Image: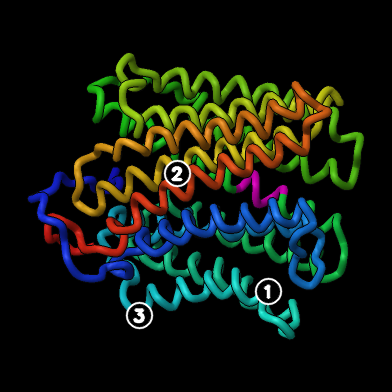
Amino acid sequence: MALLTLEEPGHKTPPKGFALFDLGFRPFFLAAGVFGAAFMGVWLGTLQAWLQTPADLPPVAWHGHEMLFGYAIAVIAGFLLTATQNWTGVAMPKGGQLQALFALWLAGRVLPYVPGLPYFAAAIVDLLFLPAIAVVVARPVFKVKQARNYPFPIMLLVMWIANCLVQYGLLNQAPGYALSGLSIALYLIVLIIVVMGGRVIPYFTERRVNSTARKWQVVEWLAPATVVAVLAVSIISHQWNAAKILLIPLAAAAAIVHAVRLTGWQAKRLWEVPLLWVLHLGYGWIVIGFALDALAAAGMVSPFLALHAYATGAIGVLTIGMMSRVALGHTGRPLQTAAIMPWAFALINLAAAVRVFGPLLLPAQTTTMHQLGGILWMAALATFAIVYAPMLWHPRIDGKPG
């Protein structure tokens, strides 16, 4: 199986020149770091009533849309535009083509704030991005007949359908459509993490600490299947409340399956390597998310706790971890983080813990927990952006393309 190639550097001379559009991970990872920190600041300002959403859109739905279809999709696009080249050997967009894709994503973030522009126009532009990425990824994958990677363009297109539902809900003040779209998108991103995490987390761990991951075929099959099952029942429950009873055993089973899977990847020395433990902790938040899903279906906790275990925890922690590792390897650098990055990894885990468990333990301080979690998130992603920006816009230090 071809994975992301992580070469050792040929020399340590600081590179010169501008290479931001040499390969997909560069612009999208940098944009994800900057946007993820900045938009969280916008959201905190909205919570304080200092700022308003574009076109007076429902604040919570708008926040969810931008964090999933803005931040998370930027990371996924950067990863797939890079990984697909390694999987297939087919060159992926760079230069002007990559600039066009990036401009499309950026327009989706900026146009809603343009005075006088109808939100409908901004929504149409935003809806163009996912199909474009799906086509770009699908062409080489189908060209070389890599069946194991067929699901990725398909999942991107289902994500597009979810985005259509959200945008319809935003445009027509129809919260049910927006909620369904956001739920589909959230669980699909978790599914992408489950599929890719199952490939790269044990692989990265084995290479770094010379371990052997334990895998069980039934667990590997059940891991994505349980995500799909919980997603399906969750969507049904939006229309038929009685279906929530099915979520209790399904989500509990999913938590057990993913806990067993994660246990099989453990190795004694992985906790000495920040680039490894951040990925393992990120996957651990999926386990917590499913456990909270089961408790929420039983009426014991708020469903928003599970939502943020996935969003702030699994997505937030794993994206910063993957961006950090991929960027090092694909700029020809040693797989060694800057001294400050383990603190960023800790901060984003703390952001998730505060956002998920703070309201549970201190319900009277829920608003404070929201604000503190947001500040910690901003600090983590701002740190990533500052540390990695020079690596992402300068050429590889080993002189190789990409």
Residue 328 visible in the shown view: yes
Callout 2–callout 3 Cβ contact below 8 Å: no
State the separation of the CA atoms marked 2 and 1: 26 Å
Residue 77 point in image, percent of width and height: 46, 59
Which of the two labelled residues, at mark 1 and mark 3, occupies the earlier sequence position? 3
Magenta residues, start to end: 183-188
State the separation of the CA atoms marked 2 and 3: 27 Å
Q: Badge 2 local density, few (<14 within 10 Å), some, or many (20+)?
A: many
Residue occupying the far bottom of the picture: 116
Under circle 3, the secondary element is: helix
Under circle 1, the secondary element is: helix
Q: Which mark is residue 320?
A: 2
Who is closer to the viewer here, 113 or 267? 113
Who is closer to the viewer here, 270 or 147? 270
User: What residue do we see at 66% from left, 29% from top?
Assistant: 290
- Is residue 204 rendered magenta in the image? no
Which of the two labelled residues, at mark 2 and mark 3, occupies the earlier sequence position? 3
Left/right of residue 120 with respect to residue 83 in the rendered view: right
Image quadrant for the N terminus? Answer: top left
- Is residue 185 rendered magenta in the image? yes
Please say if 179 is above or below 118: above
Please say if 219 is above or below 72: above
Q: Which mark is residue 112?
A: 1
Residue type at tag 1: Pro
Q: Badge 1 local density, few (<14 within 10 Å), some, or many (20+)?
A: many
The residue at which mark 3 appears reads as 96
Residue type at tag 3: Gly
